[in-house]
Image (spheres, grey):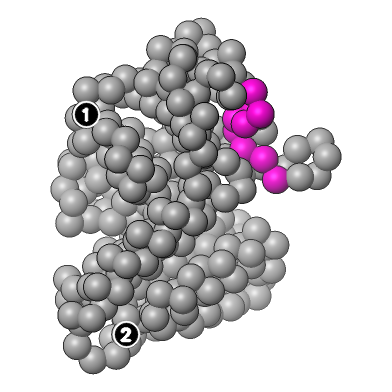
Amino acid sequence: MRVLKGAEVSAKIKEEVQAALAKCKGAAPKLAIIRVGENPDDMSYERGATKKMEAFGLRVESYHFPADISDGEFKEEFQKINGDADVTGILMLRPLPKQICEKDIERMIDPKKDLDGISPENIAKVFAGDSSGFAPCTAEAVMEVLRANEIPVEGKRVTVVGRSMVVGKPLAMLMLKANGTVTMCHTRTRDLKGACQNAEILVAAAGKAKMLNGDYVGQDAVVLDVGINVDEDGKLCGDVDFGSLEGKAAAATPVPGGVGAVTTAVLAKHLVQAAQRR
């Protein structure tokens, strides 16, 4: 079984980003990372994104706000960042605390700076097949893994397990745009095993530790695991039991070190694209 490592894909994206940067005039594009509260997962992702931007030669600035900030005060601060001409792109770490209306922020964010595809305009463009919008970084990272490893989607049977707006739904649209034949499933799908076994490309994005194993995988299928979970031993794992894929899957992404490692590289790519579109 071929292991599809994210680091190799990230390195290819870095080359593309730096080639595009060489054509940009003036200061390097700037990413604003906005975090409310001290959620460990958010802080970990922020560190990873910051490190990636700096490694790619991009500027990054973090904006931190207390978890108990009021809805009105946060929106006022957010609008300052949103309107800052020096900020090329924005990454909003979510979910936001309950007192803040997340839907309002999604509507407020400048679509041209919305690098993670949360605005209604960008979501609509993804569903319309319009590449001028930004798709969520994780969904696009899956496509980048396939592209970098020269695994074609066209004409293939693709099963996506998971229906979130972060991965499942937008990814299904990206797969359709690439001429895949897409089946969308979720944790309540009847005969989930049968739907998965039929797939030539299987994507697990339901957020449930090791919910799929080799029995769910068709012979020589390509498996992309988007899940990031903690197993009973306290170790990071995906939605797929990776060890059970040997002898069944032709190729698969590991967790950690797979799709997640590509997501921040896609964020950097989006940042440069935002600069180019100005």
Residue 237 placement, left or right of 144: right
Q: Is residue 184 visible?
A: no
From the image, state whether disc 2 or disc 1 is nearer to you.
1
Q: Position of residue 180 (x, y in %)?
A: 25, 27
Q: Quadrant of the C terminus?
A: bottom left
Q: Is residue 37 visible?
A: yes
- Magenta residues (range): 236-244
Name which residue lies at 40% across and 12% down: 198
Vertical comparison of 151 with 212: above or below: below
Q: Please state which amino acid type lies under the numbered disc 1.
A: Glu
Q: Position of residue 187 (x, y in %)?
A: 56, 22
Q: Which residue is mark 1?
A: 154
- 151 and 78: which is toward the camera: 151
Residue 248's tag is: none
Q: Is residue 77 magenta?
A: no
- 233 and 98: which is toward the camera: 233
Asked which quadrant contains residue 107, the reply is bottom left
User: Considering the numbered disc 2 on the image, is that residue within a helix, a strand or a loop?
Assistant: loop
Q: Position of residue 277 (x, y in %)?
A: 17, 71
Q: Which residue is mark 2?
A: 28
**Crowding at label 2, few (<14), some or many (≥20) Cα neighbours within 10 Å?**
some
Name which residue lies at 34% across and 55% down: 117
User: Considering the numbered disc 1 on the image, is that residue within a helix, a strand or a loop?
Assistant: loop
Name which residue lies at 39% across and 80% down: 57
Name which residue lies at 62% across and 38% down: 238
Vertical comparison of 185 with 267: above or below: above
**Crowding at label 1, few (<14), some or many (≥20) Cα neighbours within 10 Å?**
some
Q: Please state which amino acid type lies under the numbered disc 2.
A: Ala
Question: Cα distance, mark 2 to mark 1?
Answer: 36 Å
Asked which quadrant contains residue 21, the reply is bottom left
Of labels 2 and 1, earlier in sequence is: 2
Residue 216 placement, left or right of 232: left
